[in-house]
Image (spheres, rainbow, N blue to C red):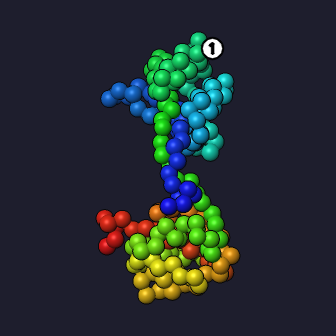
Amino acid sequence: MYPEWQKKRFYELHLAWLVQGPRGLELLFKVNPYSLYPTREEALEAAKALLKGRLDQDPRVGQGKAPILLSEEDRARFLVLLESGKALLPLDRYALLGEVAEVEERLLHKAPFQDPTNVLQSLKGLPVRLLLTPLNDPEGESQKLAQGPLEVLPEGIRVGDFFLPIPPETPVEGLAYEEAFFHLGDGRYYLYALSSSTSS
């Protein structure tokens, strides 16, 4: 297994506003987008930076506005709680929730088709589905080209009985053991592994 294919340890930062509902605290909105950091300290630093602001929802996530502005004392108390891993700061009928969670994730990897680390190689022998989406048709829908075990050959790939030639320099991107995508001509090809529950 190539290092590029392995899961790596990261720290994910979650910040969210909660509101008191009929059955207890409920999610009002997530403040920050999906965020991974190499170290716990970097995740905490990112939280500190976010806490200096209003804690409105990041525009990449939505348009929510912070229901309450935190005092300096609230910020300090929240950070102390967050350093232990998880923080819940009740504020009137709202609460600020924070967590720094250790996760293992694979990162997107990009390599030319001829490179042995291209993620298609990690899918060899697995049952996969191959889809094609036209690039020049904004309303074009993906069409299933093939389904079956993946064979990676020097000149392209074979999925079941379907053969697709791929030039050696074609960039292939994806997550090892999960999915791969690449462009050829006017099409975007997407190939993903089928789990045993979805192989029907």
Residue at 51% in and 32% down: 100
Give the x, y percent position of residue 119. 54, 66
Considering every residue shown, the one lying at the far right of the view is: 169
Visible in this render: residue 153?
yes
Q: Is residue 16 visible?
A: no
* Residue in the picture at 51% in, 86% down: 163
Quarter location, residue 172: bottom right
157 vs 37: above or below: below
Q: Is residue 192 left or right of residue 154?
A: left
Which residue position is annotated with label 1?
72
Label 1, residues with CA under 10 Å away: few <14, some 14-19, many ≥20? few
x and y percentages locating residue 62 in the rendered image: 58, 42
Looking at numbered disc 1 in the image, what kind of residue is underneath it?
Answer: Glu
Percent position of residue 87, x then y = 47, 24
Q: Is residue 133 above or below residue 21?
A: below
> Under tag 1, what secondary structure?
helix
What residue appears at the point 68 percent right and 76 percent down from the top-left corner? 169
Q: Quadrant of the C terminus?
A: bottom left
